[in-house]
Image (cartoon, grey):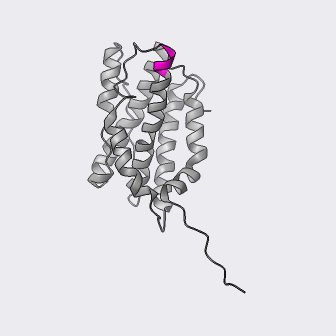
Amino acid sequence: MMPDTPAPSSSLRTRLRDATGDAHRQLDDAMAQLKLTNRRDYALFLRIQYAARIGVEAWLTRHAPSDLVPPPQCPAIATDLAAMGEPLPLEQPRFDQPKDSDALGVAWVLAGSSLGNRAMLADLKKSGAGDLPTAFLGNADMAAFWHDFRPRIDDYADTADGAIRSAHRTFAHFSAIAAAYLPNGAQ
């Protein structure tokens, strides 16, 4: 009889995606209330992104090693809002993580969002809403960061618990802000 062989290990990226799938879907479902081709909804989407990201970006800058700090997206969002004559959100909630947090999970959430941004940009272009500013959705710096970051999370990881907890907290932060801004909350 052959001894039991351990199950093949999955990549950290797979483990993060599987563990946070429900939280990610909940956030996506809440944001799906917005019709990004509608100028008012698009501005609301940008305000939500800014309000959620400003604290996360600041936390990463203070606590993460430099190779885990994605390029800041808030300046691009501010540029888009200004081009639309829209103000920045007045409330900019703080983002905190426990001292033992793994910045990798936080960086994964932000870096992975560039994939969704690319899809939204393509949808906007196909819809004929090409007059909306897209410095944020079209930001090539974040796509480049994701390209360089992905091999790091495609490797086997003995433990992903800290990164998973941090990713969950990051999704919860985004969802709480979406709930505060959206007419139907983050349901």
Whole-percent x, y for residue 62 in the image:
28, 49
Whole-percent x, y for residue 185 in the image:
58, 28
Whole-percent x, y for residue 8 in the image:
58, 68
Residue 53 occupies which quadrant of the picture?
Answer: top left
Q: Which image quadrant: the N terminus? A: bottom right
Give the residue at x 46% y 45%.
Answer: 170
Whole-percent x, y for residue 73 in the image:
33, 34
Give the residue at x 58% y 46%.
Answer: 21
Q: Which of 137 and 171 is in front in this view?
A: 137
Residue 135 occupies which quadrant of the picture?
Answer: top left
Magenta region:
124-128
Q: Nearer the viewer, residue 148 or 32?
A: 148
View extreme (right): residue: 1
Residue 102 visible to the viewer: no
View extreme (bottom): residue: 1
Q: Nearer the viewer, residue 77 or 118?
A: 118
Magenta region, main secondary structure: helix
Q: Is residue 103 above or below residue 76?
A: below
Q: Which image quadrant: the C terminus? A: top right
4 part of magenta stretch: no
Residue 22 visible to the viewer: yes
In the picture, measured across the screen, residue 187 lies left or right of residue 127, that is right
Residue 141 occupies which quadrant of the picture?
Answer: top left
Give the residue at x 50% y 23%.
Answer: 123
